[in-house]
Amino acid sequence: MVAPPAAIAAPAAPVAEAVSYGSHALQEIDFYRPADESAARSPLIVFVHGGAWAGGDKSDSTGAAKIRHYTEAGYALASVNYRLLPEAEIERQAEDVAAAVAQLVADSKKLGIDPHQIVLMGHSAGAHLSALIATDPRYLAAHDLRPSDIAGAILLDGPAYDVPLQIRDAGPFLGIAYQLAFGSGYARQDALSPAMHADGENARRFFMLHVERADAKAQAHALGDALTEAGTDARVSGFPGRGMEGHNLLNAMLGRSDSPATVPVDEWLAETFTSAG
């Protein structure tokens, strides 16, 4: 009688290391080292979760597929928490994301990451915050860093790259929700619009992904056009999926082999880290 083959153990799930960047309970980072740690310094992906600036969490919004896929590809991955509305206005949230990046740079030797090869990746509100610190220099400047220190930004179906346009396109009900988050004053709305800062110093490359949502598509192209006009390398691509289901699945499935976005993002990351190395 032939003995049955031994069961193949599933690979161990990546284990997070906790990194603090402030005294608030939400000023925390989950840091994942690459599966193969033979490289002296690894490129880093910094993921910023969504949740309408008022919810979400690094523990459940990153997506297990992303963590395994990118660490197995040789990248380190950091998933960032930040303070939320109504406790912290959006300006404070952007400050938190910038402070988290600065902490990772400061700890780069200990963590085994290359501080010159950092890509921001954000979903939904996290895409907006990533875009904001990648275009408006005041947030990173507080830590003696510049947007051009960021190799690139991957923005997953984000809103509010152009806040006044977002409010107009959202309609009466959602428009009020955006006004509660961004205020009714045009000066503040413009200040929190990444597209309004695109004519200055930016992160070196951008990749805006959107699903079949009219406002998300308009926002991605508004930022992409502004960046391209300013001479920044910017790519905008649409992917299958409709409404909020498509919005959420784009993020949740990224890194899986059955996600149509996985290979294009992999190729973009390889190009970005090669040029930044």
Image (cartoon, rainbow, N blue to C red):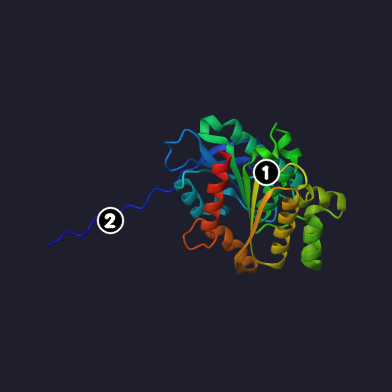
214 over 119 or under it: above or below:
below
Report whether 142 appears left or right of 74. right
Q: Residue at x 79, y 67 (%)?
A: 171
Q: Which residue is nearer to you in this view: 211 or 56?
A: 211
The Cα–Cα distance between marks 1 and 2, rounded to whole angstroms, is 47 Å
Q: Residue at x 46, y 50 (%)?
A: 68
Residue behind mark 1:
203
Q: Which residue is nearer to you in this view: 206 or 46?
A: 206
- The outermost residue toward the left is 1
How many residues crowd mark 1 within 10 Å: few (<14), some (14–19), many (20+)? many
Amino acid carrying mark 2 in the image:
Ala
Q: Which residue is nearer to you in this view: 130 or 125?
A: 130
Q: Which residue is nearer to you in this view: 241 or 224?
A: 224
Q: In the rendered view of the protein, which quadrant contains the C terminus? A: top right
In x, y percent, where is residue 47? 59, 47
- Chain-order first, disc 1 or disc 2: 2
Q: Quadrant of residue 249?
A: bottom right
User: Could you say whether the residue bearing mark 2 is in a helix, strand or loop?
Assistant: loop
In x, y percent, where is residue 132? 72, 47
User: Could you say whether the residue bearing mark 1 is in a helix, strand or loop?
Assistant: loop
In x, y percent, where is residue 264? 54, 57
Q: In the rendered view of the protein, which quadrant contains the N terminus? A: bottom left
Question: Can see residue 93?
Answer: no
Q: Quadrant of residue 135?
A: top right
Question: Can see residue 37?
Answer: yes
Q: Which mark is residue 85?
A: none
Q: Which mark is residue 7?
A: 2
Amino acid carrying mark 1 in the image:
Ala
In x, y percent, where is residue 208? 65, 56
Please say if the residues under marks 1 and 2 sit with CB atoms less than 8 Å apart. Answer: no
How many residues crowd mark 2 within 10 Å: few (<14), some (14–19), many (20+)? few
